Image (cartoon, rainbow, N blue to C red):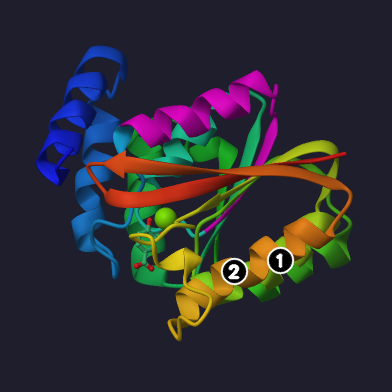
Amino acid sequence: ASAPAWRSVDRYFAAALVNEDAALVEARESGARTTMPNAEVAANQGALLGLLAQIGGARRVLEFGTLAGYSTVWFARAVGDGGRVVTFELEEQNAVVARENLDRAGVGDRVDVIVGSAAESAQALIDHGVEPFDLVFIDADKPSNPTYLAATLKLTRPGSVIVIDNVVRDGAVSDEKSEDPRVQGVRAVVDAIAANHDLDATALQTVGEKGWDGLIIARRR
Ligand code: DHB
Ligand code: MG
């Protein structure tokens, strides 16, 4: 099928099955005001993230890469009242947009948007000995994927779910000679997962509104 067919199928399923209220629509569209326009997950993938959190009974979610907070809203709603989402964002400008979106969605009080280097922010949580997270979504700068996975392993517990975004990149991931540092970041984290006997994992390719990409879904034993 051609790319336009993927788009119309995404639109069909999103319209039929994905309940985006005005706050989610605004969060998605406000991605245009961030430093990385159009990098938020598609609506049907936002719904998938929320479902994974709910299926796993997640009360605490950690996200690497906030941007406008679109996926953050899905997670914050999934964890419910009394749940907690911590999300790392490098750029203050994006965090401002995200906080507006979280407040508009009525979940601002259950989300901490932490501005700065995600590696340093994660290390601070490790040093603080925070309660483990039930689900971690890694969706920030791709070359740092291995660093973020290593931190995630210190911030989770057996049974925790780990999701990594953008692992296909128009198919470039299977090119072992790729010099794209983002592809190398994906391949390195795949190697780390493969070598870790405490992780069960798979990867799914996705096509749709966002073109051809994919997700890794892993679970700690
Ligand atoms: C890029 C990053 C993302 O998280 C995404 O969803 C799409 C693209 C990027 O780095 O190009
Ligand atoms: Mg992404």
- Crowding near pointer 1: few (<14 within 10 Å), some, many (20+)? few
Between 41 and 58, the one lying in front of the other is 41
Q: Is residue 181 left or right of residue 187?
A: left
Q: Are marks 1 and 2 in contact (CB under 8 Å)?
A: yes
Q: Where the N terminus falls, by quadrant?
A: top left
Figure check: 160 above or below 20: below
Residue 38 counted in the magenta span: no
**Residue 213, how many percent across, how many down?**
38, 52
Q: Where is mark 1, residue-wise?
A: 191
Disc number placed over residue 187 in the picture, else none: 2
Which residues make up the magenta segment? 44-64
**Residue 114, how many percent across, how many down?**
57, 61
Q: Can residue 40 be seen here? A: yes
Q: Amino acid at mark 1?
A: Asp
Q: Quadrant of residue 35?
A: bottom left
Label 2 CB, ligand 1: below 8 Å?
Answer: no
Residue at the image point whose x is 74% and y is 57% from the top? 193
Residue at the image point whose x is 89% and y is 51% from the top? 197
Residue 62 counted in the magenta span: yes
Does dot 2 land on a helix, a strand or a loop?
Answer: helix
Q: Quadrant of residue 170?
A: bottom left
| Circle count | 2
**Residue 87, how many percent across, how many down?**
56, 53
